[in-house]
Image (spheres, grey):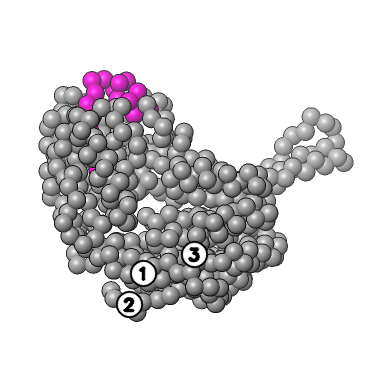
Amino acid sequence: MKQDMKQERNFVNGRFIEPDGDALTAILNPATEEVVGHVHNASREQALSAVESAQAAQRLWRVMPAAERAVHMQKFADAIVEAAPAIGAALAMESGKSLSDATNEAIYAAQITRYHAEWARRIEGEVIPSDTPDENLVLHREPIGVVACLIPFNFPIYTLMRKIAPALIAGNTVVVRPSNNTPLSAFEVARAVERAALPSGVINILAMEHATAEVVCTHPAVGMITLTGSVGAGRKVLEYCKANIAKPSLELGGKTPAIVEPDADLQKAARELIGSKLSHSGQLCTAIERVYVHESVHDKFVGMLREQMLAKQIGDREEDAAYMGPLVNKSSRDGIHAMVRRAIEAGATLECGGEVPNRKGFFYPPTLLSNCRQDMEIVQEETFGPVLAVLKYSTIDEAIALANDHQFGLSSVLYTENYRTVMKVSNSIEAGELYINRTPADPYQGFHSGWKRSGIGGDDGKHGMLEFTQTRLVVMKY
């Protein structure tokens, strides 16, 4: 997978622009700690130019028939599929994913682009009865304008198109800031924008330091900011939104609870929960983080979880895709390890893992903690790593109360064969999603939306697309 080391330039108004200064960010392979490329950080002037280009392009893009915008988007999806090997190679190097997983992420990004393109003839307004005779109320759906898209490191290509595609079909244009940990793959997407011959300025992609990102997000032309990130990052975006009273769309932290009832298929539950927890080393917003197990099967189930975790080896996924790969950087690994040590000091039992490997790369082993309490940091705060906390409960009402006793409410899981329990939890869980006898997967025709501190607004499906619109009521007297 070795490639010539690139120095990526920023993509503004339909072309890659020359660097403005010497500000470079080195991109590391988290499995080897080797530098695999550099990106030129955009200057303040380039960031302003990107927003102005997006604003100019949006004046034409918004009046283009939605069906015509959809044709452009389908061509863009074709270009992403064609570029999937290059996107995947860049993403694998900068993220620690296997080449197959990284390439498949690009294919999935093309699929969600096609899905949103199909909304072209389905963005509908409403005719509303008036209280006044001889009058009609007509509600129109309109684009917002320029959207600033702030992309996370964990699924940087899928999330990129999860935001860009609905924004574009609704008639908006975008300025994108990829994660500073995984920007190389985003510039491969920019090359796909070139090949698809999208109108200049509709999509702009720039590597930015925080101060430059603020310049973009507070520009008067920016009417919406969409972020997938931490609660802290969400608070910062809300500060940015104050400048223009811009619309926020935020997917923030998660701490997915799984409730395991005694009638569940325990082997299936253990296998799937650990599969979710260890996928991309637990760096998923919806990864299982805390498991509530009925006391009658608790000890047995902990043993099953331990067995599943011990069976997973860590290593460079370029060498073997079956390995569990690294965390994104040293800071993340060190923070997770410190949380594990504090949990043990507070009384949790370390079932497996819990030690930093003596090797290159930002690896951390699959780690299982039992005898956890609800008030522990490891239960209350997101780890975003391969660490699972287990607690026991006596009744389903207690399990629901514990699952809901939390600042986050992004996703949740229930394993049971009892339909009464399913209905009870379905009507009681405080989360935007509930998965029954399976782990989260974010179907793009659904709606991925968090409660509490897990976010504002949401992604995917009809409702995710409508996030990128605003309304105009026309009152027509005749």
- Tell which of 271 and 221 is nearer to you: 221
Locate the C terminus and report the quarter of the image it occupies: top right
| Residue 21 horizontal/vertical position (percent) | 53, 73
Considering depth in this image, is 410 or 210 the residue closer to the camera? 210
Question: Circle 2 sits on which residue?
Answer: 3
Res 333 visible: yes
Q: CA distance from mark 3 to mark 2?
A: 20 Å
Give left or right: position of 286 versus 115. Answer: left
- Amino acid at pointer 1: Ala
Q: Residue at x 59, y 68 (%)?
A: 46
Name above or below for residue 148 compared with residue 398.
below
Q: Quadrant of residue 471?
A: top right
Picture coordinates of residue 389, whole percent (x, y): 24, 36
Q: Secondary structure at mark 1?
A: helix
Instruction: Check disc 2 and give the amino acid type.
Output: Gln
Q: Residue at x 30, y 46 (%)?
A: 335
In the displayed structure, does residue 437 sit left or right of residue 241? Answer: left
Give the secondary structure at mark 2: loop
Confirm or deny contact between disc 3 and disc 2 (CB under 8 A).
no
Q: State whether residue 147 is above or below residue 40.
A: above
Which residue carries the number 1 mark? 90
Q: Which residues are magenta?
A: 387-404
Badge 3 marks a residue whose secondary structure is loop
The reply to whether the C-beta atoms of the residues labelled 2 and 1 are less than 8 Å apart is: yes
Q: How far separated are the C-alphas under marks 2 and 1? A: 9 Å
Residue position for label 3: 207
CA–CA distance between discs 1 and 3? 15 Å
Asked if the residue under mark 3 is in contact with the one under mark 1, i.e. CB atoms within 8 Å, the reply is no
Label 1: few (<14), some or many (≥20) within 10 Å? many
